[in-house]
Amino acid sequence: MTRTAIALASALFLVAACSSPSASPGGGGTIKIGGGFALTGEEASLDVPAANGAKLAVKQINAAGGVNGSQIDFIVHDSQYIATVAAQTAKQFVEQDKVPVMIGYTDTDSVTAAGPTFQNAKVPFITVGATSPKIPTQIGDMMFLACFGDNVQAAVGAEYSYETFGHTAYFLWDKGVEYTTLLGAYFKTRFTELGGTIALEDSYDDKATDFSAQITKIKALSPQPDFYYVAAMPDNIGTLVKQFRDAGLTGPIVGGDGYDTPDLVKTAGASTSNVFFTTHALMDATIGTDGIKKFITAYKTEFGNDPENAFAALGYDTVYLMVDAIKRAGGTDATAVKTALEATKDFKGITGSITFSPGVHVPQKGVTVIDIEGGKLTLGGEVVPEKVPAP
C-alpha cells in the first residue's frame, strides 16, 4: 500500500531461498513453503511486516528441529502489489520452485490474481491477510484464510459505531479496490439493518490524494453525521485523515484493517485522535496477551523494531497454521494437507483461534477495535459481532 523507508529496509531481510529437494514423510531434506508478498509498492507497509512475521516463524520452527524432521525452505517472491506480477510469480512458485504449499498476501486483488494458478496446480494456499470472505468460493477448495472476513470486521465497525457514536453516518469508500468495495458494502448492510441512517454516501478513485470535494459535501450536511465511516487503503488513509482534521471535521473516523499501518499517524500527525479501526490484534507489549508479548520480543530481537502492525502476527500465525497441517498430514501431499487444514479445530494463533471445516475455509475470529488518541494506538475493544452479513 504505502511506500515507506521502514518497509523497504525490512524487505532486505527477505531473500528467496534456493531450490532444494522436498521432504519425505520420514523426514530429512527440506520442506518448501512459498511466500508471496508485496515487498515493494503500495502494499509494502502491510506485506513486509507479514513476510517478516512469517520468516520469524520459519526460523523458530527450523531451530526447534523443523517439520517432521525436515527444515523449511521458505521461498519468497515480491509481487510488487501489481496483479500481473502476482500472477507471474505464482507461475514461478509452481513451475520453477515447485512449492507444494503456499502462504501470503494481505490484499484480495493479489490473491485473486495468483490464486487460480495454485488452485489449478492443487497447491494448498493460505492467505495471510486478504479478508474477502468470497475468496474460497472464487478460487477453489485449496484456498484458506488465516484472517477473519470483511463481513465480520464490517459488522463490528457498524455495531461498535452505532452503539458508541450514534445512528447517522457519512459513508465514503475507495471504489478502485475489491477490499474497500466489499468492506464498505458490508458496513452499509449491517449499519442500516441496525436502524442507522447514511446521511451521505460518496466514493473516490484509488489513487486520490485530494479529498476537498468530499469535505465540501460533508460540511454542507445539516445536521452533521455522528461519525464518518471510510473504507480506505493504507496508502491514502493518512492523507484523508489529515485533510479532514485540517478542514475542521473532528468527528470519529472509522474504518477497517487497511488503517493498520504506521503511515496513518506518520502522515496525519502525532496529534491524530478520534480515529477507530477494526483489525486482527493490538501489538502492545504491556496489555497484549502472553503470546503477543512473546511475539513482540522475538520480532524486535530479529528485526530491531516492534511489529509494525497486526499483519506481522498474521504472517507468523499462518506459517504455524500451515506447519500444523503438514505435521498432521504426514507430509506435503496436496490432498492430505487440504484435508488436515479442513480438520483444524481451535488452532491457537496469537491473532485468535482458528477452526475450519470442508465447507468453511474462513475462520470466525474475534475482532480488535483500535482507538487512536494523541497519535497512540490504544485498545477500543475486543468484539464478536452479533450478526454478520452474508458473503
Image (cartoon, rainbow, N blue to C red):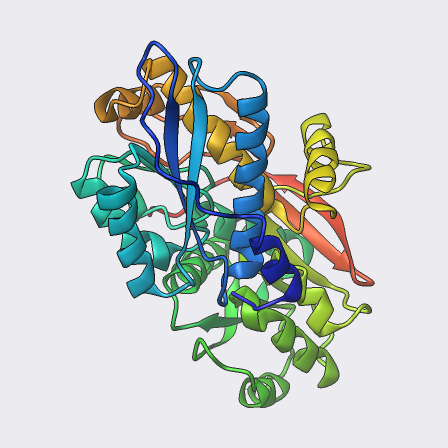
Q: Residue at x 38, y 72 (%)?
A: 176
Judging depth in this view, the residue of 331 and 290 nearest the camera is 331
Q: Is residue 291 visible?
A: yes
Placement of 190 over or under 142, stated as above or below:
below
Q: Could you say where residue 279 lies in the image, as x and y percent from the top left?
A: 58, 48
Instruction: Give the residue at x 46% y 43%.
Output: 128
In this view, the residue in front, 323 or 216, is 323
Residue at 77% over, 72% down: 269
Residue 235 is left or right of residue 24, and the answer is right
Which residue is more in the foreground, 189 or 113?
113
Q: Which x, y percent locates residue 168?
A: 58, 67
Q: Position of residue 132 (x, y in %)?
A: 38, 50
Q: Residue furthest left?
A: 120
| Residue 75, position as x, y percentages in the image | 41, 41
- Taking 163 as reference, is 247 above or below it? below
Say which residue appears at 56% left-offset and 55% top-offset: 11
The answer to whether any part of residue 138 appears in the image is no
Q: Nearer the viewer, residue 25 or 103?
A: 25
Residue 70 in which image quadrant: top left
Task: Report how many numbered discs are placed on residues in the image.
Answer: 0
In the picture, measured across the screen, residue 362 lies left or right of residue 57, that is left
Classify 98 as above or below 324.
Answer: below
